[in-house]
Amino acid sequence: MGPVLRRLDEVAGTLAARTDVVGLLGLGSCGAQRGRLDEHSGLDFFVVVDDGAKWRYLDRVDWLPAPVTYLFSHDRNGRKALFEDGMLADFRVFTLAELAKTAFSGARVVWRRDDAPKDLAESGHAVPREPFHTEEFHLNNALVSLYVGLHWERRGERLAASRLIQGRAVDDVIALLRLDGGDFPYRDPFDPSRRVERAYSPRNLPLDLMVPGYGGNVAAARFTLDWLAQRYAVAAGIGDAIRELIRSADV
């Protein structure tokens, strides 16, 4: 057992001694997908408590089993804590009623009280699904992101443009690869960028050319458009409009 799982078991041991804690769920690489664990993994967990006990576990962290050197309130239900040994914990605290309304996946029961629901690790709220997970949607969504992003680039909104051209459009490229039979294990339903480097080779997904950085929006748009046009039927109207923006940027 690695240090992350050992620390999580220590958290469980501390919580098990408290009467107002219902259970502890491991998430992410601490959850059902422990094959993801490596030396860069942190602690990701939910603490489930009785009604009225929630703020006791958010306002104080004396229940954590090791010294904390940094604490950040990143969510009304959660905190990020840095342990003295450099391990980062990302945790949230819920009552049973709140947990039932929370979307999550891949959870694992690390510890639960005897009277805790047996389905504690199952979300009562469906994980959000992509509204249109089709080739037509992702192709055209990527093209529109390139088009709008190039206009923002010309306006001088380079950062916002990069988030469309090198962010949103690339998310749609990844979705297209998945539709083509390239889905991969341990995919994060909340963040399509997680672990793509392990799933797709640079030949199939040349991220260095699609995401060259802040000053590379036009080059990124040119490459991504060519990548899409080589594989899919890009409508002439939007394709020509994007190419014209790229040509005018090169002048």
Image (spheres, helix red, strand yellow):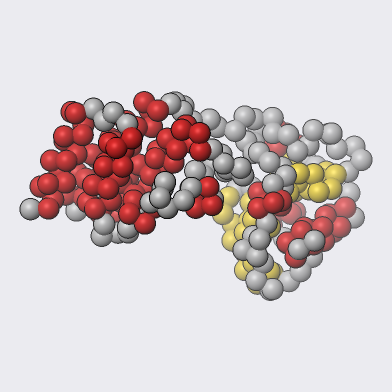
Identify the residue shown where x is 62% and y is 63%. Answer: 40
Residue 35 visible at all: yes
Residue 134 falls in which quadrant of the image? top left
Question: Is 93 on the left or on the right of 163, as rendered?
Answer: right
Residue nearer the viewer, 102 or 134: 134
Percent position (x, y) of residue 13? 86, 57
Q: Quadrant of the N terminus?
A: bottom right
Residue 168 visible in the displayed image? no
**Which of these two is toward me, 210 or 18?**
210
Q: Residue at x 48, y 47 (%)?
A: 200
- Identified at 45% across, 38% down, the residue is 177
Residue 74 in picture, x, y percent from top left: 56, 54
* Image location (x, y in percent) of residue 224: 30, 44
Q: Position of residue 128 (x, y in %)?
A: 55, 32
Q: Is residue 62 left or right of residue 80?
A: right
**Residue 23 vertical position relative to residue 175 in the rendered view, above or below:** below
| Quadrant housing residue 243 | top left
How many numbered discs? 0
Please say if 5 is above or below 33: below
Say left or right for 134 vs 73.
left
At 73% from the left edge and 71% from the top edge, which residue is drawn?
67
Closest to the observer, 242 or 208: 208
Looking at the image, residue 104 sits to the left or right of residue 14; the answer is: left
Q: Residue furthest left?
A: 251
